[in-house]
Image (cartoon, rainbow, N blue to C red):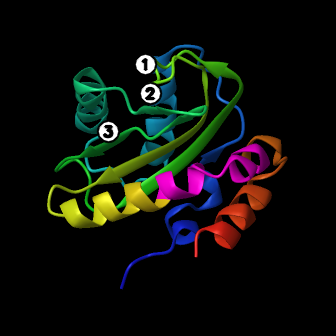
């Protein structure tokens, strides 16, 4: 059975305001959310996987959104984290605009179809401008989870 978005995103993996001001620092800060959950098998290898993925092609998909993701043996199960930067980060996004919303997805090597489905589901949600604005305006982690729960069905 597939996990829902809110099941994949517990409050401890949500950051309401990133400290980072640069792309690589943002990726490191969001990856640290996953590492602090104790679910990463190898934090360093996972971070390297994410940074290598970014070298291939930016995961800044436009409209202020980035979907950094990686598939690696450093991850034992599908994981997700959400972070936000109100001022925005220069992320080399496809539309050259700053990124405000980040959904980081970690997946084991064996889960290729699951990760593709999750990426598609999250990117469909984020195509909705009203949803993106609501995520930016949300004041608490609970509000973010509720928004995702409402829209992510």
Residue 38: x percent and y percent?
Answer: 41, 53
**Type of secondary structure dominating the magenta stretch:** helix
Residue 148: x percent and y percent?
Answer: 65, 63
- Report which residue position mark 2 lands on: 28
Q: Which numbered mark, 1 or 3, is in the foreground of this view? A: 1
Q: Is residue 131 magenta?
A: yes
Measure the C-alpha gap from mark 1 to mark 3.
15 Å
Q: Secondary structure at mark 3?
A: helix
Quadrant holding the N terminus: bottom left
For the residues labelled 1 and 2, say whether their Cβ atoms are less than 8 Å apart: yes
Residue in the picture at 25% in, 21% down? 55
Q: Which numbered mark, 2 or 3, is in the foreground of this view? A: 2
- Residue farthest to the bottom? 1
- Report which residue position mark 3 lands on: 43
Q: Quadrant of residue 69?
A: top left
Q: Is residue 37 visible in this depiction of the protein?
A: no
Residue range highlighted in magenta: 122-134
Q: Is residue 74 magenta?
A: no
Q: Is residue 87 visible in this depiction of the protein?
A: yes
Q: Is residue 24 left or right of residue 98?
A: left
Q: Quadrant of residue 21?
A: top right
Q: Which numbered mark, 1 or 2, is in the foreground of this view? A: 1
């Amino acid at each position: 059975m597939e996990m829902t978005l809110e099941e994949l995103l517990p409050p401890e993996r949500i950051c309401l305001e990133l400290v980072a001001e640069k792309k690589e620092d943002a990726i490191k800060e969001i990856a640290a959310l996953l590492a602090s959950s104790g679910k990463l098998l190898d934090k360093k290898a996972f971070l390297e996987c994410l940074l290598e993925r970014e070298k291939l092609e930016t995961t800044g998909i436009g409209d202020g959104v980035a979907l950094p993701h990686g598939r690696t043996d450093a991850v034992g199960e599908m994981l997700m984290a959400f972070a936000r930067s109100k001022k925005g980060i220069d992320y080399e996004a496809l539309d050259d605009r700053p990124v405000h919303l980040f959904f980081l997805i970690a997946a084991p090597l064996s889960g290729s179809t699951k990760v593709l489905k999750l990426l598609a589901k999250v990117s469909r949600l984020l195509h909705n401008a009203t949803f993106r604005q609501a995520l930016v305006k949300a004041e608490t982690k609970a509000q973010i989870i509720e928004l995702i729960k409402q829209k992510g069905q």
